[in-house]
């Protein structure tokens, strides 16, 4: 059984996942109910990653998880995304690979199906736009180079950072990942757009092609 809600005197950073989730779900004078629901959510979905990645319909299968509590979970996720997005949206030049990695993890690590996303940057590496371009099944997402090229031209991008998630949690790049990166590199080069990096995102971890020497 997961831990119960801790005393308010204990720092938030020391609370268990179940306690944090229960605090966010709690209504007035319903501490025990919130704790029970939090435990059930973690038992059903395995982790906070699983809870955030589950659909509204799946979450509402847990007794007590009505629309208002689902909205609280979605609000938690949105707040987290907005916080980690600040360095991306507001810094003059995007020159921190760590900030990019955190941003991409926040956007993709909870997705249950494989998604392929692109960050579009100008010639000074300033952020222009982020978009999940393709979504697929649990282990595959179709990628059409023509669509990526069209979007790069639409946003007048000079560079892009590619990213896709592996819902399995394994972040090692596959041969298919390397193949589609090369295809996109060749296609984008025709319109003078450079691939700056490609990230594979898993639960709480990521791999950079640039750091691995897989992009030159």
Image (cartoon, grey):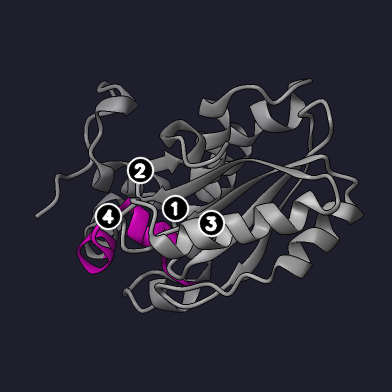
28 lies left or right of 75: left
Which residues make up the magenta segment? 41-55
How crowded is the residue under tag 2: few (<14 C-alpha within 10 Å), some, or many (20+)?
few
Q: CA distance from mark 3 to mark 2?
A: 19 Å
* Quadrant housing the N terminus: bottom left
N-term-proximal mark, 2 vs 4: 4
Q: Are marks 3 and 1 in contact (CB under 8 Å)?
A: no
User: Mark 4 sits on what residue?
Assistant: 47
Q: Main secondary structure of the magenta part?
A: helix
Q: Are marks 2 and 1 in contact (CB under 8 Å)?
A: yes
Q: Report the front residue among 7 and 106.
A: 106
Q: Residue at x 79, y 45 (%)?
A: 193
N-term-proximal mark, 3 vs 1: 3
Q: Mark 4 vs mark 1: give the one in front.
A: 1
Return the mark for residue 109: 1
Q: Mark 3 vs mark 2: give the one in front.
A: 2
In percent of width and height, residue 74 lies at 53, 56
Query: Could you say whether the residue bearing mark 2 is in a helix, strand or loop?
Result: loop
Q: Mark 2 vs mark 4: give the one in front.
A: 2
* Quadrant housing the C terminus: top right
Q: Is residue 89 above or below residue 117?
A: above
In percent of width and height, residue 120 lies at 76, 44
In percent of width and height, residue 43 lies at 20, 64
Q: Is residue 79 above or below residue 188?
A: above
In percent of width and height, residue 207 lies at 41, 41
Residue 114 visible in image: yes
Return the mark for residue 204: 2
User: Mark 3 sits on what residue?
Assistant: 74
Task: Choose top left, top right, bottom left or bottom right for residue 160.
Answer: top right
Query: Could you say whether the residue bearing mark 4 is in a helix, strand or loop?
Result: loop
Q: CA distance from mark 4 to mark 1?
A: 12 Å
Query: Could you say whether the residue bearing mark 3 is in a helix, strand or loop?
Result: helix
């Amino acid at each position: 059984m997961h831990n119960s809600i801790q005393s308010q005197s204990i720092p938030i950073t020391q609370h268990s996942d179940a306690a944090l989730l229960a605090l966010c779900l709690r209504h007035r004078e319903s501490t025990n109910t919130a704790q029970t629901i939090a435990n059930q959510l973690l038992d059903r979905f395995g982790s906070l990653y699983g809870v955030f990645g589950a659909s509204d319909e799946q979450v509402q299968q847990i007794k007590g998880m009505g629309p208002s509590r689902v909205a609280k979970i979605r609000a938690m996720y949105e707040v987290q995304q907005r916080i980690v997005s600040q360095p991306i949206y507001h810094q003059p030049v995007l020159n921190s690979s760590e900030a990019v990695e955190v941003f991409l993890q926040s956007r993709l690590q909870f997705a249950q199906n494989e998604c392929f996303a692109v960050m579009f940057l100008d010639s000074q590496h300033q952020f222009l736009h982020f978009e999940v371009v393709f979504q697929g099944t649990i282990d595959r997402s179709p990628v059409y180079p023509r669509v990526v090229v069209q979007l790069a031209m639409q946003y007048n991008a000079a560079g892009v950072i590619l990213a896709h998630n592996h819902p399995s949690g394994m972040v090692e790049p596959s041969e298919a990942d390397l193949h589609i990166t090369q295809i996109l590199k060749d296609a984008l080069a025709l319109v003078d757009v450079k691939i700056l990096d490609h990230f594979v995102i898993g639960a709480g971890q990521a791999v950079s092609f640039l750091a691995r020497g897989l992009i030159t």
